[in-house]
Amino acid sequence: MSEGPTTRTDFSVLRTITTRWEDEDVYGHVNNVVYYSFFDTAVNGFLIDATGTDIRRLDAVGLVAETRCTFLRELGFPGDVQAGLAVTRLGTSSIVYRIGLFQGDSDEPAAIGHFVHVYVDAAERTVTPVPDVIRAAVTPLVVA
């Protein structure tokens, strides 16, 4: 795993996501593709709450440029998942997030995610700086 927060207590922001019946596959656990949906939901939900705005209406929007997941143990339905958020790099036009997924009482993650937003002009789709409102929201999440 890359550097950054690992255990639940290492993350300063935790967001709760409720699993759904359809999230489980025929093997009886949350399917791997759903973990990526949890990453997207956690990051964008945080940005909406932290900025107090509909981020889809900004002049610049964050598009996912890269994502990956290290699967460590199963998640299941029913049960809430806590997504821990951290920022490992805050660039001029991009943000790199580290996301830990936790379920139950365990302080150890079920998965660790890597999620990169690159900001583009909403109309032209050309790379542009991270909007000030987004930068202000994620700055407290930056980890060394």
Image (cartoon, grey):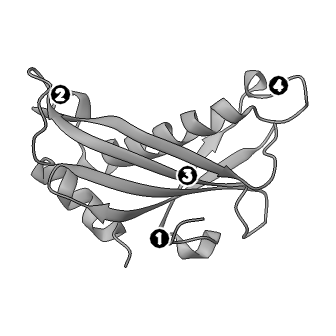
Q: Check residue 64 in the rendering and tell me which mark sits there, or answer none.
A: none
State the separation of the CA atoms marked 3 and 4. Answer: 20 Å
Instruction: Name the quadrant of the N terminus.
Output: bottom right
Q: Earlier in the sequence, mark 3 or mark 1?
A: 1
Local crowd size for mark 3, using a 10 Å CA cut-off: few (<14), some (14–19), many (≥20): many
State the separation of the CA atoms marked 2 and 3. Answer: 26 Å
- The vertical placement of 83 against 23, above or below, is below
- Classify residue 135 by image quadrant: bottom left
State the separation of the CA atoms marked 4 and 1. Answer: 31 Å
Identify residue for label 4.
Answer: 25
Q: Earlier in the sequence, mark 3 or mark 4?
A: 4
Which mark is nearer the camera, 2 or 3?
Answer: 3
Which mark is nearer the camera, 2 or 4?
Answer: 4
Q: Earlier in the sequence, mark 4 or mark 1?
A: 1
Q: Position of residue 82 (x, y in %)?
A: 62, 53
Local crowd size for mark 1, using a 10 Å CA cut-off: few (<14), some (14–19), many (≥20): some
Identify residue for label 3.
Answer: 113
- The vertical placement of 85 against 56, above or below, is below
Tell me if label 4 and label 1 are in contact, CB under 8 Å. no
Q: Position of residue 47 (x, y in %)?
A: 32, 46
Q: Secondary structure at mark 3?
A: strand
Q: Position of residue 120 (x, y in %)?
A: 16, 34
Q: Amino acid at mark 3?
A: Gly
Q: Check residue 12 in the rendering and tell me which mark sits there, or answer none.
A: 1
Q: Is residue 54 visible?
A: no
State the separation of the CA atoms marked 1 and 2. Answer: 27 Å
